[in-house]
Image (spheres, rainbow, N blue to C red):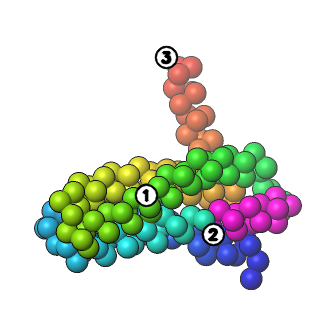
Amino acid sequence: MNATLIHLALNHLPILGTLTGIVILAFALWKTNSSMINTALIILIVSGVSAIPVSKSGEEAEHVVEEYPGVSHDQIHEHEELAESAMPVSLVMGVLAAFALYFQIKSHPRARIASISVLVLAICNFALMANVAHEGGKIRRPDLRQEMHDSDHSIQQEAEEH
């Protein structure tokens, strides 16, 4: 198994795990269900930390994929830049979720506010990671690149007509 396959296999975890954690945490906070809050926080910890192997395998995958025909080095660079800016948010989310879980287990008076803070950060992290994923998809999916090009082109045409 090479770095590209590892990257492709793992890259969904920070995104879908975060989305799953958001949904469960929001519902659990609404219902005030401690065991669901704990479950959501554990999912968000794993999702946050999973960005590390995704990033490491992405570095190695870059060297393999950039040699493929039709792959744009600029597209890889854009994906990498976005990933580098999203990585700290993902890690902070994981660490904050760990603190919130600790507060939750200890029945700390600020456990709820910590969990709400994690929820807000997780939503931000999901938005960032979804953007990273979209840009990553463009590397090997020319239809995604074309979709964006067509969209830009139609906006330009509309501007010229007015």
Front-most of residues 100 and 71: 100
Q: Residue at x 86, y 61 (%)?
A: 67
Residue at 41% from the left image edge and 49% from the top image edge: 124
State the image coordinates of residue 57 (x, y, percent, origin top left).
70, 68
Q: Main secondary structure of the magenta part?
A: helix
Q: CA gap, disc 2 to disc 3?
A: 49 Å
Question: Nearer the observer, disc 3 or disc 1?
Answer: 1
- Asked if residue 20 shows in the view, the reply is no
Q: Nearer the viewer, mark 2 or mark 3?
A: 2
Quarter holding the N terminus is: bottom right
Q: Is residue 141 left or right of residue 46?
A: right
Q: Position of residue 88 (x, y in %)?
A: 54, 52
Give yes or no for contact between labels 3 and 1 (Cβ–Cβ under 8 Å): no
Residue at 53% x, 22% y is: 159
Bin the neighbour count of mark 2 within 10 Å (Cα to Cα): few under 14, some 14-19, many 20 and up.
some
Q: Which residue is more in the foreground, 148 or 11?
A: 11
Residue under label 3: 162
Q: Which residue is mark 2?
A: 53
Which region is colored magenta? 53-67
Badge 3 crowding class, 10 Å Cα cut-off, few under 14, some 14 to 19, many 20 or more, is few
Tag 3 secondary structure: loop
Image disc number at residue 93: 1
Amino acid on which the number 2 mark rests in the picture: Pro
Describe residue 7's horizontal placement relative to residue 112 as left or right. right
